Amino acid sequence: MRHGKAGMAIVTLLAIWGLTRAYAQDSLARASAIVTHAEIPRYPALALAGRLTGSVHLRAAVEHGVVVNAKSDSPSRLEILINEAIENVKTWRFAHDATGSFDVIYSFELRPDEGVLPENPRIEMELPTLVKLVARPVKPTCQDCGPGSFIRQPGD
């Protein structure tokens, strides 16, 4: 019986340590996580033209209410989207006493239908954990555009 109480105490201490550590690592995902200012995120024009989509995961550090650092572990093929997400998250402001770190996902999606003219994307934000941009791709305007359309043919 004695070993059971000691074992239970160890399990309890480990659980408390784990919760404390999780809170410290994600301190802005709780009470002080209210974003007081954020610039409107953009779907990069080059990514839109290239029909690049994907989700970007950022880990951001905050000191005195200001995002001081943001890094991504997303695939390098999403570099255009990663750079835009980092640029945007650095515009966020929290309460002056907010210090810690948080994770945020930026989701860049394209609608299945094409438009004739560029238009603003639909933006959904659940700050500080999610930013979702859904854009409508622009239909190519030239009739000869397509694979191989810029290759000079013999006799041209």
Image: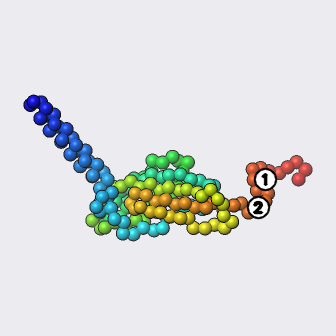
Residue sitting at x 13%, y 32%: 4
Marks 2, 1: nearer the viewer? 2
In this view, 119 is above or below 129: below
Residue at the limit of the structure toward the right, as seen here = 155
**C-alpha distance separating marks 2 and 1:** 10 Å
Q: Badge 1 is on which residue? A: 149
Q: Is residue 113 left or right of residue 54?
A: right
Residue sitting at x 38%, y 53%: 103
- Which quarter of the rendering shows the N terminus? top left
Q: Is residue 31 left or right of residue 10?
A: right
For label 2, the SS is loop
Q: Badge 2 is on which residue? A: 142
For label 1, the SS is loop
Residue sitting at x 22%, y 43%: 15
Q: On the image, which quarter does residue 6 sit in? A: top left
Q: On the image, which quarter does residue 39 sit in? A: bottom left
In this view, 5 is above or below 100: above
Q: Position of residue 138 (x, y in %)?
A: 66, 62
Which circle's residue, 2 or 1, is located before the other in the chain?
2
User: Could one spot residue 85 in this view of the protein?
Assistant: no
Q: Is residue 63 left or right of residue 104?
A: left
Q: Position of residue 132 (x, y in %)?
A: 49, 59
Q: Are the two marked residues, 2 and 1, in contact with CB atoms closer than 8 angstroms?
A: yes
The number of discs equals 2
Residue at the limit of the structure toward the front, as seen here = 1
Q: The disc labelled 1 sits on which kind of residue?
A: Ser
Q: The disc labelled 2 sits on which kind of residue?
A: Cys
Which label belongs to residue 127? Answer: none
